[in-house]
Image (cartoon, rainbow, N blue to C red):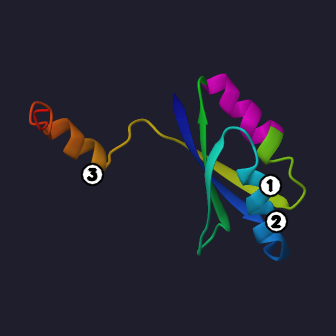
Amino acid sequence: MVTAIVLIKTDVHQVPETAQALADLGHVSEVYSVAGEFDLVAIVRVREHDELADVVTGEIAKLPSITATETLTAFRAYSRHDLERLFAIGFEAAE
């Protein structure tokens, strides 16, 4: 699984509509409105890198209200929840 974080600049008058359009795309798992240089952040998950190009340039960047994107490809995920599960191996309650 390939995960990418797509930073998005959009028409400020279209942020909610653009966020919903992004959320409706098949490979977009989450969309956040954010403060700062970018207006939205989309989390994209695909099986292979080739699909990432199709989603970012073929779907996301083609939405009319989007003016620019920057894509960050995730190498590894670090999560408190994942670490807790890892360290709990062998300590599950007996049933």
Mark linked to residue 21: 1
Whether 7 is among the magenta residues is no
* Residue placed furthest toward the right: 64
Q: Residue at position x 76%, y 59% from top?
A: 20
Question: Which residue matches tag 2?
Answer: 17
Q: Tags 1 and 3 in contact by the CB under 8 Å rule?
A: no
On the image, the x and y values in percent for residue 39 come to 68, 68
Q: Give the distance between the C-alpha atoms of the residues marked 1 and 3, in whole angstroms.
A: 30 Å
User: Within the image, what quadrant is residue 9 found in?
Assistant: bottom right
* Disc on the earlier residue, 1 or 3: 1
- Residue on which disc 3 sits: 80
- The kind of secondary structure element at disc 2 is helix
Q: Residue furthest front?
A: 95
Mark 2 or 3, nearer chain start = 2
Whole-angstrom CA distance, mark 2 to mark 3, is 32 Å
Question: Circle 2: is it few (<14), some (14-19), or many (20+) Cα within 10 Å?
Answer: few
18 or 74, nearer to the observer: 18
Three-letter residue code for mark 1: Ala
Task: Point out the image quarter for the C terminus.
Answer: top left
Residue type, numbered disc 2: Glu
Residue appearing at x 12%, y 38% in the figure: 93
Give yes or no for contact between labels 2 and 1 (Cβ–Cβ under 8 Å): yes
Q: Would residue 54 be counted in the magenta stretch?
A: yes
Q: Is residue 69 above or below residue 89?
A: below
Q: Is residue 1 above or below residue 28?
A: above
Dividing the picture into quarters, in which one does residue 57 lie?
Answer: top right
* 92 sits to left or right of 63: left
Instruction: Determine whether, in the image, residue 19 is placed left or right of residue 38.
Output: right
Question: Closest to the observer: 84 or 90?
Answer: 90
What secondary structure prevails in the magenta region? helix
Task: Give the residues drawn in magenta, as a range.
Answer: 49-58
Residue 14 placed where, x, y %?
A: 83, 70
